[in-house]
Amino acid sequence: MSFNRLIADDFVVSADSITAGLWTDSNTATITTFYTSSTQANSTSGNYYLNVFSNAATSSLEFATTYGNEGGSGSLEYNSTVPGKSYSSTIYGQYRSLVLGDENSSFVFGEISASDFWAISVDRNRYKESLFPGSLTLVISSSGGKLSLTDNSQAVTTVTYNDAGRVYQLVSGSAGSVYTGVNSNGYSATSGSYGWFLPDIATIILNPLATSASINLVPTRTPNTNGNNPWTLTKAIELGASFTLNSQETITSDYIFVRPRSSEFNYSENPSFISGSTGEVIYSSFINNPTTYITTIGLYNDTNELLAVAKLSKPLQKDFTKEALVRVKLDF
């Protein structure tokens, strides 16, 4: 076995972005059918959120819908003697802490503050790192018609950040292309944007003020009432029958260039080449005209610990007349 110390020039780091279909174990980017479980909907968890599947015959969860209201309206109160403390107020507080990081902050969609919202949270098994901005097309339908939504990542030059990472406005459009029928922003100035697209936590937040003005998609806001608002949104998605979204993952690759020069790695340390009694090389041709075949490259640290092994696709012939350059790629 022979060793050669690597230097800084032997290392190159590269980062590549890889996208894939989000749904059903990353096999497709679009789903058109949506199913829910009556067992889950009627359980305690159904008061908080509703799980949505793309296939009634499988257990592959795609996403969940929920509704949050700052004043607790639209859902039953935990205790009638404590007004405003309900399932929807808990959801509102959880998302406010997760997204805004401040219990005194408000959700501002476009230029309009809202006291309630719908949320779509993609199941963690559907993606590896984040959602892919510009790939979203969510069609929702209600009594007022159909609405196609996308994010404005392709229309802005400066990205906004909060505690949830990147924040893009939801606008009327598809696949990152903004429809300008309302105005140049893709949404109404009086009701605000249609919500937020939060790719780093795989969440879409919908603004009920905008959906109400556009297609009459309105949540129930009656205090201490089971408004079944997660189902209202899920039904609108089911009627829209098209939800397109991709996942995104950054793969960092460390390229290591190993250079066996003409004078190096020409002799074998295999014991079969050495006489056990005299310690001499058995084959004279191996003395004057040695030839070896490189099959494996091992990467060691300074304490001689093997960290990684690279296998060549086929043995690489090496002698005093040949030099080689082997590129080892480490993905992490």
Image: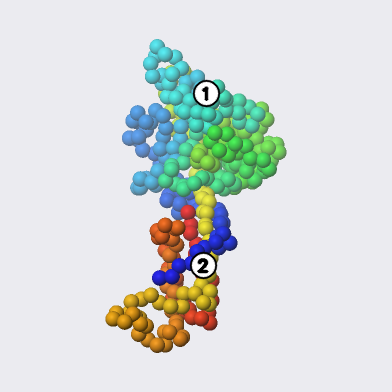
The answer to which quarter of the image holds residue 114 is top right
Quadrant showing the N terminus: bottom left
The answer to which quarter of the image holds residue 152 is top right
**Who is closer to the viewer here, 84 or 53?**
84
The answer to which quarter of the image holds residue 300 is bottom left
Specify the farthest residue to the bottom.
284
Residue under pointer 1: 103
Residue type (three-letter) at the residue carrying disc 2: Val
Left or right: 178 with respect to 241?
right
Determine the secondary structure under disc 1: loop
Left or right: 158 with respect to 207?
right
**Location of residue 31 in the rendering, given as x and y in whole percent from the top left corner:** 47, 48
**Location of residue 244 in the rendering, given as x and y in whole percent from the top left corner:** 52, 47
Q: CA distance from mark 2 to mark 1?
A: 55 Å
Disc 2 crowd, CA 10 A, few/some/many (<14, 14-19, 20+): some
Residue under pointer 2: 258
